[in-house]
Image: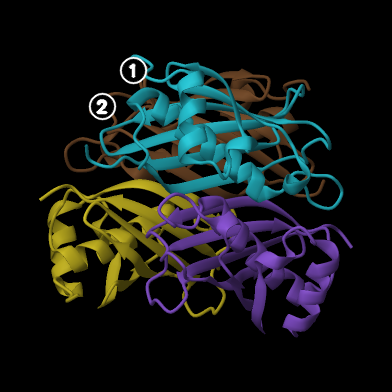
Chain colours: A cyan, B purple, C yellow, D brown
Amino acid sequence: MAVKMSAQDLTAFMAVEFPQVNEDFVIEEVRDMAVRVRMPIAYRHLRPGGTVSGPSMFALADCAIYMAVLAMIGPKGLAVTTNCSMDFMRKPEAGKDLIAECRLLKLGRVLAVGDVLIYSDGLATPVARASMTYSIPPR
Amino acid sequence: MAVKMSAQDLTAFMAVEFPQVNEDFVIEEVRDMAVRVRMPIAYRHLRPGGTVSGPSMFALADCAIYMAVLAMIGPKGLAVTTNCSMDFMRKPEAGKDLIAECRLLKLGRVLAVGDVLIYSDGLATPVARASMTYSIPPR
Amino acid sequence: MAVKMSAQDLTAFMAVEFPQVNEDFVIEEVRDMAVRVRMPIAYRHLRPGGTVSGPSMFALADCAIYMAVLAMIGPKGLAVTTNCSMDFMRKPEAGKDLIAECRLLKLGRVLAVGDVLIYSDGLATPVARASMTYSIPPR
Amino acid sequence: MAVKMSAQDLTAFMAVEFPQVNEDFVIEEVRDMAVRVRMPIAYRHLRPGGTVSGPSMFALADCAIYMAVLAMIGPKGLAVTTNCSMDFMRKPEAGKDLIAECRLLKLGRVLAVGDVLIYSDGLATPVARASMTYSIPPR
């Protein structure tokens, strides 16, 4: 399957469709059924002790899988998350960006499933993992 | 088991420990192994079409289970979410607050497990469900 | 919504469609969007120490939600589990049947979501919880 | 970290500790923080239409992560599954063995987290994914 949207295309799409979260994410790379997304950490993502909040990591995983789906099916704004599971395994490093490495495991007509490993920038062991299902609306 | 913190106690604890999210949540009721938390919806929680974002619902579920744990074990700021699963079942109503009804299913020495149903205020069918595990630090 | 299949109807359906697991489950009660299913424990369900195996509890939860879906939509053999999350919270009592209390949280055209609490017969605190999504084939 | 148990060691351990399921699984390969386990498919694993049952796939994922944990910590029979999430993405091929490719993402003092992709033998796209948490008893 061919990639239908580049990192640049996805960035432009996000700026228009999701202005509220656009600054939170940088789409770094798009490959066949895979994307890498960076979350530059700001004060609003933090919890006491300087760690990144769970909802911020959820948002990153959610964005990454959505980007991976759009990259493959094109700019359809209506796919919705129907299910998510996450494991929070380590405390993110204070002051480091988070990096989400996402791959799509299934891209069906109706449902897409992807998983994500989230890393503190520069470290080899993931801080969290997520898997999510997206429901793709009928065309 | 006796409830160790009231809704008022939990509200005061949140204001000190989690000033970043304090305005997002109103702890409405605390019972034995259960809490109800309201999220007054503001612009920052919304997505195109007026629906509440997934990360906002994650944050609400996470807060509700955390409050339920603290209500039972007292003000220990260090419990951390280790696992979460959520199902997003319906679109929240635009302009309605979200209500999380949380119960603890297990409160062990090391792990606590709770589940949450999230409702649009005033509606009978839940918009989302979540279950989460918290790791409780040794005393 | 009216219940379309009684406990008796579901039992007869299982005997024909799922002869391999039919003896594992007793459908005890069917209500609107809810069922109770008993698993009489046999040697094949056990692990060292007399506890019930994880796969046996998964099978019970899976059966219970499937029965709850069929009770509402009628005897369509083709709904498939697409997602599951489970928390195993306590060791089941040795020698006690397991009881699954299941409710449907969503019954859509395409997806159904249910959750289950599993109890050791006669005890008040659940040993496990599960939530599952079923994909309902187009009619 | 060094691998403490080889595929042969794990096979011998299973034969003694889990005689009920021993025939279901073949431990094919053990690497650092990773194992591959084969499930030779038999009649008892099947559902109508020749597909492998959900509980059988759960059992395979559960076994694979348990083997990966034991491979790293040595023969301690008491680790227990506390949480699982699975996505069932495609129908397994009738008549093909299932292969579980498992990696450990975290091996802490108290909790281990692993994920698994399950394949029909010889096919490139996974039929299911799972992630599980094991609680490791104090030494």
**Residue C120 drawn at (x, y percent):** 50, 71
Q: Nearer the viewer, residue C68 or B27?
A: B27
Amino acid residing under circle 2: Glu
Q: Dot 2 surroundings within 10 Å: few (below 14), some, or many (20 or more)?
A: some
In the image, is residue B13 above or below residue C64?
below
* Label number found at residue A51: none
Residue D13 visible, this orientation: no
**Is disc 1 in contact with disc 2, using a CB cutoff of under 8 Å?**
yes
Q: Quadrant of residue C100?
A: bottom left
Who's the residue at 43% across and 21% down the image?
A33
**Residue B103 drawn at (x, y percent):** 58, 73
Amino acid residing under circle 1: Leu
User: In the drawing, does residue C103 fall left or right of residue C75?
Assistant: right
* Label number found at residue D123: 1
In the rendered structure, which disc, 1 or 2, sits on the residue that comes first in sequence?
A: 2
- The chain ID associated with circle 2 is D
In the image, is residue C127 above or below residue D52?
below
User: In the drawing, does residue D68 fall left or right of residue A40?
Assistant: left
Who's the residue at 25% across and 34% down the image?
A109
Q: Dot 1 surroundings within 10 Å: few (below 14), some, or many (20 or more)?
A: few
Q: Nearer the viewer, residue B22 or D129?
A: B22
